[in-house]
Amino acid sequence: MNAKKPHGHTNGTASSAGNGAASSSSAWDARYAEAARSDSSVWSLEPNAFVASVVAGFAPGTAIDLACGEGRNALWLAQRGWQVTAVDFSAVAVEAGRRRADHLGLEVNWVVADVTDWVPPALVDLIVIAYLQLPAAELASVIATCAGSLEPEGLIVLVAHDLDNLERGVGGPQNPAVLTSVDSLRAAAADVEIERCEQVLRPVGDAHAVDTVLIARRS
């Protein structure tokens, strides 16, 4: 964790603070701490809409919320009976998630770690990756680790800012190096069975953002 890595969070979307060196994590720590001081949050308290739409009908099992930020997806999963591990490189974000879990009476395993080199200690049924914006090779490495960390029939559910958002959408990181595409995600998920990989439009006020979504299953 000593190489500074570009990353991207966007207003109104899920947090993805799972990459970067100490300097990057410190910057996000400061942002999360500022939100906490005003009794607010950096990201919405609601789960990501795509994640919720995909996972809502699943029977609960074991799950990881990778690059969880303040843990909105992890908390939503825990409310539905999932055994969740939430991982982020910002200790302040993780602490905010832990406080919310305690307030809601939910049990979540919170982990402070850089998701680019963190390996799950056991196989799980579901891995959620919401807006972890990394260069293609680094994201592919994370997805490969996730693929090897799934139980048979386990799923990766991923949503990310698409490269086309620069020209056709609003918000999101403006660094093309950390934006995804259908082709790059298909290549990254070569070790699992891809059930869905496509662009989707996400409403943002009166406009929209362009995301890439991936659902992949370990056969």
Image: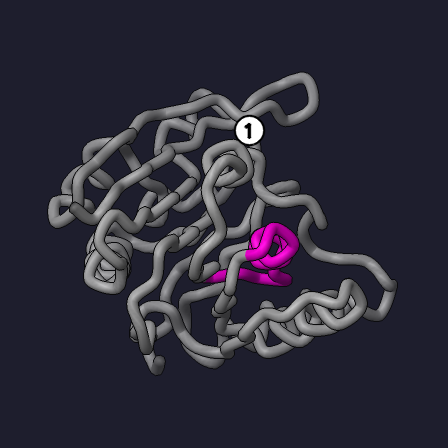
The residue located at (35%, 80%) in the rendering is 1
Question: Eyeballing the image, is 36 above or below 191?
Answer: below
Compare residues 166 and 59 and report the one nearer the observer. 59
Q: Position of residue 207 (x, y in %)?
A: 61, 19
Q: Specify whether 91 is left or right of 50.
A: right
Residue drawn at 60 percent across, 50 percent down: 80
Compare residues 151 and 66 and report the one nearer the observer: 151
Residue drawn at point x = 26 percent, y = 58 percent: 151
> Where residue 53 sits in the image (x, y, percent)?
52, 32
Residue at 24% across, 40% down:
185
Q: Is residue 33 left or right of residue 48?
A: right
Residue kind at label 1, given as amino acid type: Val
Quarter-of-image position of residue 64: bottom left
Residue furthest out toward the top? 206
Describe residue 184's horizontal placement relative to residue 132 as left or right. left
Would you say residue 188 is visible in this rendering?
A: no
- Label 1: element kind: loop
The residue closer to the viewer here, 118 or 63, is 63
Is 101 a magenta residue? no
Residue designated by label 1: 170
Residue 135, can we see it? yes
Q: Residue furthest right?
A: 38
Q: Is residue 168 above or below residue 75?
A: above
Q: Disc count in the image?
A: 1
How is the rendered protein coloured? one colour
Residue 170 image offset from top left, x and y in percent: 55, 29
The magenta segment: 67-81
